[in-house]
Image (tube, grey):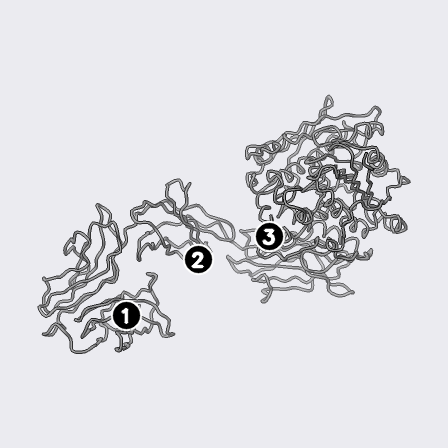
Amino acid sequence: MKKPILLISLLLTIFMCVNSFAQVMPLVYSVENTGANCPSPSLPSLGELPLIQALPDPFAFADGRGRMANYSDWEVRRAQIGAQIQNYEIGQRPVRPDTITASYSGGLLTVIVTVNGKTLTLSSQVILPSGNGPFPVVIGMNSQSGSIPQDIFSSRNIAQIIFVQDQVTSYETPSNTDPFFQLYPNLNVTNTGQYSAWSWGVSRIIDGLELVQNVLPIDLKHICVTGCSYAGKMALFAGAFDERVALTIAQESGGGGATSWRYSHSLPAGTVEDIDNTNYSWFMKSMSQFSGNKVSYLPEDHHELMAMCAPRALYITANPEYVWLSSQSSYVCSEACKTVYTALGIPDRFGYSIVGNHLHCEVPDSQTAEIGAFVDKFMLGKDTVNTANIADPYFSIPLSPWITWTNPTLLNDTTYFTSLVYPPNDQPGLDTSITLKWNKVSEAQKYLIQLSTDAAFTSVFKSDSTTTDTLITFTGLQKNQEYYWRVQVRSSAGPGPWSNISSFVTTLLLPDKPRLVSAVSNQIGNVTFTWNTVSTATRYLGQVAYDQAFTNVFRLFATSDSVDIISWFTEGQLYYWRVQAINLSGSGAFSAIANFTLLYAPTSLALQLNASDQITLTWTNNSTIADGNLIERMQSPQTSFSLLDTLKGSGNSYVDKQVETGQIYTYRVRAYKDSLESNYSNQVSSNVTGVKEGSIPKEYSISQNYPNPFNPSTVINYALPKSSLITIKIYNILGQEVKTLINSQLQAGYYTTQWNGDNNSGKTVSSGMYICRVDAGQYIKTIKMMLLK
């Protein structure tokens, strides 16, 4: 028979500290979360988080302001840990709803929660001792007392209540149709874990007990929660997040409970429950981003989840008979948690026991005695009961690689923490006159308030250091502007640290629905999407899909402009597209849906003037499915093109024999297939008046563009004495390339090209001086052009 191994993590040596500070740290609180108004820490994304190989320091503030110095700091630090666990592990845990009703009759407690017209009902059996009460109460996860023998509680006249998890969300098969997710449509099985929902449900049972005090005699200062295995995790999360729970007993909770994610991952793969293989219906899906070696980027670990129970009592157990439960990890995690209880001067309120030689969720005799001691002291108020016992560690595990911090010596002073109350983060629709509110700090003589348009406060828009009140009104704010603000306490001891930074947005409404303009191709496989500008938008999100319902989105694009160019579309495929406008207030409605089918347009259209006053057009065919090309011509002073000819097949040249001396002709080409037509090629123009006898020029030349200045387009003539690779590009006065007009191998002859005052992306450029550069081997020349609008 194996020798039982007992680990009770409590310290005798600082008994005097317990007596000195027992009144400093309450045994329980009357509200669910005393840190509800504490500053929220920064919650960076995975790519911004630092690597922390050891267990994170539970005393280090998450906002970089250092480590705890006073007992009162724990309220803020605990709130930061809770915010991190919600953000990275279990998802948002809603606060107490405004509408809760409760009744008690026939041994049944009924709690009805109403949110946005939807209801959730909790029905819990209550077992009351004989007598008048009020009675301490244990809330068991799915049974009257979890897996702890009922007589431990019934023999002590403690009431027992069942929490039924499936009334909140179904075990291991959560669905968005579950009552909890129906109450909160913004929460779902992807972004919210069941431990968030279940622990929230336990808190609503406690709300119900508060509401029926006149008919159900429960001692609300002595509430215990308990459960085993996955329900042990449930009890741990419930006790950690609700400070009305005086005692939490988490029995053999395994991975994701009273164990360290980091340490469990250091054990042989697949042997224990760690972040790689836990049940992800219990946690938010995005926690998996920390699986594998990325677990050390998690900013918190579960010694801090356990420590959230402090200063209230916590007792946890582990069972080395079941390797999957990772008892070694429970040991390391418990030793780390113990440092918090020790620093707070309350080591007698935390205990852990690791005992073998029994079945999972079975309570051996040694643990029965220890649980009884915790119940007597923290449920019945028997202060003389000794819970400060410690045993030799069973595991020969070096703790120094995991617990790298020193315990701070805490004082009874109050650190200057300021919680920003109003407006909340990213609150839209505020006026240009705004009243800021923050919590009162008793030591404060004055407050310094700063308002900035950037989160780094490099430029302070408004400030005030004279107010002694906890609110101030600033006027003259700019419209449609995001502001950041913070508060600092000033006293005779000097300035305190800054509060957290909050932000708000002035007079900003949700953006209107954009109107689509066009989706046309301008290069091989490229499509230019255009829509109208929405005045309240800061950016736009576009979607391109294969189907009109957008169940199969092919491409996404995001831009701050009202035009974007997307590449790599397939010829002949029907696409649907839509756009929505976004600003700091959120996303507006999607635009109407439009569709397009892409046919690659011809490119590199050029012309040559022949001696016979014929014009030869050449271009590059890019389409692989087109039936041919349509050649269009416009003769000055006409203002619109007309169809010149239809070229069937894959030809890429055309001779216009219908030109007349003294005329200016402009050409463009586009591909066609059945009733589908591509976007146009570039345009080229020819001034037939300038044609001289002889089809081959004697030298390279480029003439000054005409007209010049121009708006909206100008024509450039050039000549090649021999076959040449020629490029003609437009640059701005800074030397930046604006537009490539020609980049082709051309035969000897006279040519004309045209610039429409646009850039390579198809966008119109601004007025100003531009440089046209022609490069044909050894021949390089530039001309200046003036665009006036």
Image coords of residue 92 (percent x, y) = 62, 44
The quadrant of the rendering that contains the C terminus is: bottom left
Q: Nearer the viewer, mark 3 or mark 2?
A: 2
- Cβ atoms under marks 2 and 1 closer than 8 Å: no
Considering the numbered disc 2 on the image, is that residue within a helix, a strand or a loop? loop
As shown in the figure, which amino acid type bears the numbered disc 1?
Answer: Thr
**Callout 3 amino acid:** Asn
Tell me which numbered mark, 3 or 2, is placed earlier along the sequence: 3
Q: Secondary structure at mark 3?
A: loop
- Give the mark nearest the N terminus, 2 or 1: 2
In the picture, the disc for residue 425 is 3
SS for dot 1: strand
Q: Is residue 379 visible?
A: no
Vertical arrangement, residue 217 with respect to residue 61, above or below: above
User: Residue 191, located in which quarter of the rendered image?
Assistant: top right
Q: Position of residue 754 (x, y in %)?
A: 24, 67
Q: Residue at x 55, y 60 (%)?
A: 477
| Residue nearest the observer in this picture, 503 or 72 | 72
Provide the residue designation for mark 1.
Answer: 727
Q: CA distance from mark 3 to mark 2?
A: 23 Å
Cα separation between marks 2 and 1: 32 Å
Residue that mark 2 sits on? 560
Give the vertical position of 52 relative to 707 (above or below): above
Residue 114, given in percent of the width and then of the height, sits at: 61, 33
208 and 141: which one is in front? 141
